[in-house]
């Protein structure tokens, strides 16, 4: 979140960066509703992964929930997204030069 002071005296606009916005969604797991709070970027990636796997988000949430060990569901989803994209990165040839010895 940041403040934007305009030229008008006493006018302050409060804006939020989309990177800092945490959205809470309700999901149903085993017939029970539970809230999952994630940054919007993680929700977007999670939806994209579900689409790539041709499965509903609810099924992917259940799968992540079944796989998690010792963490809350929000953290488990973040780690799932991170692992998914790490695996994709391993499969692609690196041409960034980052981390390569010159």
Image (tube, helix red, strand yellow):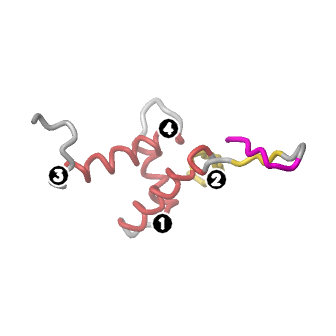
Point out the image quarter for the C terminus. top left
Q: Which residue is mark 2?
A: 25
Residue 75 shows which numbered tag?
4
Residue positioned most to the right: 10
Residue positioned most to the left: 102
Residue 2 placement (x, y as % from top left): 69, 41
Horizontal placement of 94 versus 83: left or right? left
Residue 5 placement (x, y as % from top left): 77, 44
Labels 3 and 4 touching (C-beta < 8 A): no
Q: Give yes or no for residue 5 being in the magenta stretch.
A: yes
Labels 1 and 3 touching (C-beta < 8 A): no
The residues bearing labels 2 and 3 have C-alpha atoms spaced at a distance of 37 Å
Q: Secondary structure at mark 4?
A: helix
> Label 3: few (<14), some or many (≥20) within 10 Å?
few
- Above-or-below relation of 94 to 74: below
The residues bearing labels 4 and 1 have C-alpha atoms spaced at a distance of 20 Å
Residue 85 placement (x, y as % from top left): 32, 50
> Label 1: few (<14), some or many (≥20) within 10 Å?
few
Q: Earlier in the sequence, mark 3 or mark 4?
A: 4
Q: Which residue is mark 1?
A: 56
Residue 52 placement (x, y as % from top left): 36, 66
| Residue positioned 48% across, 66% down in the render | 56
Q: Secondary structure at mark 2?
A: strand
Q: Earlier in the sequence, mark 2 or mark 4?
A: 2
Q: Which residue is mark 3?
A: 95
Labels 2 and 3 touching (C-beta < 8 A): no
Q: Give yes or no for residue 92 being in the magenta stretch.
A: no
């Amino acid at each position: 979140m940041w403040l934007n002071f305009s030229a008008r005296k006493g006018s302050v606009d409060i804006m939020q960066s989309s990177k800092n916005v945490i959205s809470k969604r309700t999901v149903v797991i085993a017939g029970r509703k539970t809230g999952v709070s994630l940054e919007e970027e993680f929700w977007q990636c999670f939806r994209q992964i579900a689409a790539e796997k041709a499965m509903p988000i609810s099924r992917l949430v259940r799968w992540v929930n079944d796989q998690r060990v010792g963490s809350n569901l929000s953290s488990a989803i973040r780690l799932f997204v991170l692992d998914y994209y790490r695996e994709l990165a391993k499969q692609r040839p690196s041409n960034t030069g980052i981390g390569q010895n010159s």
